[in-house]
Image (cartoon, rainbow, N blue to C red):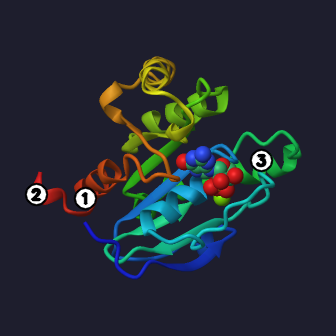
Amino acid sequence: MLTVKPQFLFSAASASQFLKTEKPVIAVCGKSNVGKSSFINALANRKKLAKVSKEPGRTRLINYFDMGEFVLADLPGYGYARVSMEEKAKWARLLDAFFADRSNVGHVFCLVDIRHAPTADDVQMTEYLNYNILPFTVVATKSDKLSRAQISRSVTVIAATLKCGPDNIIVTSSQTGYGMDSVLAAIEKTVYPEQI
Ligand SMILES: Nc1nc2c(ncn2[C@@H]2O[C@H](COP(=O)(O)OP(=O)(O)O)[C@@H](O)[C@H]2O)c(=O)[nH]1
Ligand SMILES: [Mg+2]
């Protein structure tokens, strides 16, 4: 599958600003700094489509990217310690509104850092998606930082912690492009469901 002329569309700060589109929307979620923006850039094959930050946790917006045949929604990251309760509540309201309307989202990629066991926030996120019957795939990021043996041990821990099958986890590296073919194959299943 090709991503044709990927481009940033706009940011939404509240439900009234959510994108209305006929295209399938695929959401990217995960804690701050897990590699969401880098993942989007790797998928788009562009270096600076989404802003990669050294400072984690600033954005509280949903950033939309048109990828040609589908749209990516970069969701605000969670789990950043230096955020007030009020900010956290705002984040939860925004995400609740986003996931409540199925036309907002066809599939979710849940990013987790392959070097660490998923956090309580990651568990809560995937439990939320399961509870709301939202289809998702776990994407383990930054695999370039681990050896093959470490990767396979990590996948076992991630699967057990998030209570998903190892088949539902895609190991990736935005730096080397590893696993991006599998990600595109998963996207294809959402974009062309009739072909399954
Ligand atoms: N080695 C490596 N570093 C990565 C990878 N993906 C992201 N990073 C780094 O992780 C940091 C956070 O990335 P970013 O995409 O901004 O994360 P976000 O906050 O989830 O959007 C940056 O310093 C990236 O360069 C990867 O696949 N491999
Ligand atoms: Mg980001």
Q: Is residue 94 visible?
A: no
Counting residues from the start of the chain, the first of labels 2 and 3 encountered is 3
How far apart are the alpha carbons under marks 1 and 3? 34 Å
The kind of residue tagged 1 is Glu
How far apart are the alpha carbons under marks 2 and 3? 40 Å
- Which residue in the structure is indicated by mark 3? 89
Q: Nearer the viewer, mark 2 or mark 3?
A: 2
Q: Secondary structure at mark 2?
A: helix
- The numbered disc on residue 195 is 2
Q: Residue at x 59, y 29 (%)?
A: 115
How far apart are the alpha carbons under marks 1 and 2? 9 Å
Q: Are marks 2 and 3 in contact (CB under 8 Å)?
A: no
**Image quarter for ligand 2:** bottom right
The local crowd at label 2, few if under 14, some if 14 to 19, many if 20 or more residues have their Cα within 10 Å, is few
The kind of residue tagged 2 is Gln
- Which residue in the structure is indicated by mark 1? 188
- Left/right placement of residue 18 relative to residue 186 reads right
Specify the quadrant that holds the N terminus. bottom left
Q: Residue at x 51, y 56 (%)?
A: 39
Q: Are marks 1 and 2 in contact (CB under 8 Å)?
A: yes
Residue 23 to residue 26: above or below? below
Tag count in the figure?
3
The kind of residue tagged 3 is Ala
Counting residues from the start of the chain, the first of labels 1 and 2 encountered is 1
- Residue 149, image x, y percentages: 44, 20
Q: Secondary structure at mark 1?
A: helix
Q: Is residue 152 visible?
A: yes
- Residue 25, image x, y percentages: 41, 64
The local crowd at label 3, few if under 14, some if 14 to 19, many if 20 or more residues have their Cα within 10 Å, is few
